[in-house]
Amino acid sequence: MGNHGNSFISFGGIKTFDITNIKLVDQFPIVIDIDGQGIAFNNDGSKMYAAGISNAGVSQFDLSTPFSVSTVTSSGIVGISEDSTPEGMAFNNDGSKMFVAGRSNKRVYEYDLSVPFSVGTRVFFARSIVIPNFGNLWGVQFNNDGSKMFVAGSATSRIVEFDLVIPFDVLSASALLSQEFVVSQDISVRDLVFNDTGSKMFVIGISNDRIYQYTLTTPFDIGTASFSTQSDILFDDNSGQGIAWNNDGSKLYIMGRQNNTIFEYDVC
């Protein structure tokens, strides 16, 4: 979820949604599933989610302080029986739908949630789409209105973009991908996220253990992406799998598989 903002915070002139200068401020070990992958938040940061493959499920955590990983008050896990290796995850805008990228079957799965952002209320109506000729499937994201879906894959180290005829409906995806972007900086892409305007894209890769930042001249059009900068996360975890932002772009979150920990960074 973490796709928000492209501005400067008024206090201190800190540039938001920018990885040029980030500082580790907190971390949270995911003991409920020892093989963490994707990460997401609900809209107000009161809930945090982590996809994991040890228990093949999605964990949900309540946060007493929004977007503060050290304030988890409760947790639970829901199994994803449709795929044994759930990787990336995302929600639609109102939390009535959850999407999971499944590596085993190379599918993006769509779930209806009867209670918004409550993964325990998921219902699967056999709505999924195969991502062909893509190698391993890792991350999934959408643009703001759900008219585009983006998928990250590591075997081909690329991001692909699909047009959706019906917003946030994976079955309405165009038969052919509309755009693709090869991540030349890393051969093992794991996840992606955008800022809220779609003018920036962030990709995490594990071959160099870095986060990569790209500028998009046309919002949410990966065909217009150009490399901007990168940030090294090797010293915190050498297997970063998931990436997310808080709403205003002042905090960045990384799911680290080596330590099975969610790392929280401040943008300085």
Image (cartoon, helix red, strand yellow):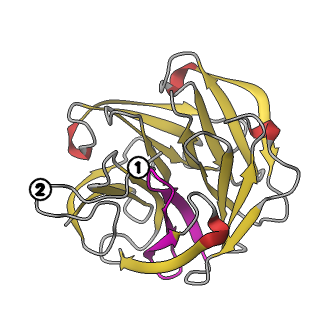
What segment is highlighted magenta in the picture? 188-215
Q: Is residue 210 above or below residue 110?
A: below
Asked whether, in this view, residue 61 is left or right of residue 186, the answer is left
**Which of the two labelled residues, at mark 1 and mark 2, occupies the earlier sequence position?**
1
Q: Residue furthest left?
A: 12
Asked if the magenta segment contains residue 160, the reply would be: no
Circle 1 Cα neighbour tier, 10 Å, few/some/many (<14 / 14–19 / ≥20): many
Name which residue type carries label 1. His
Residue 124, quarter of picture: top right
Write the residue at 52% across / 47% down: 52
Query: How far across and how far down the image is residue 228, in percent?
Result: 45, 79
Name which residue type carries label 2. Phe
Q: Residue beneath label 1, please?
A: 4
Q: Is residue 20 above or below residue 102?
A: below
Q: Which mark is residue 58?
A: none
**Considering the numbered disc 2 on the image, is that residue within a helix, a strand or a loop?**
loop
Decide if residue 108 is in sight here: yes
Write the residue at 64% across / 24% down: 112
Q: Which mark is residue 11?
A: 2
User: Observer-nearest residue: 241 or 201?
Assistant: 201
Q: CA distance from mark 1 to mark 2?
A: 18 Å
**Considering the numbered disc 1 on the image, is that residue within a helix, a strand or a loop?**
loop
Q: Nearer the viewer, mark 1 or mark 2?
A: 2
User: Observer-nearest residue: 88 or 193?
Assistant: 193
Decide if residue 154 is in sight here: no
Circle 2 Cα neighbour tier, 10 Å, few/some/many (<14 / 14–19 / ≥20): few
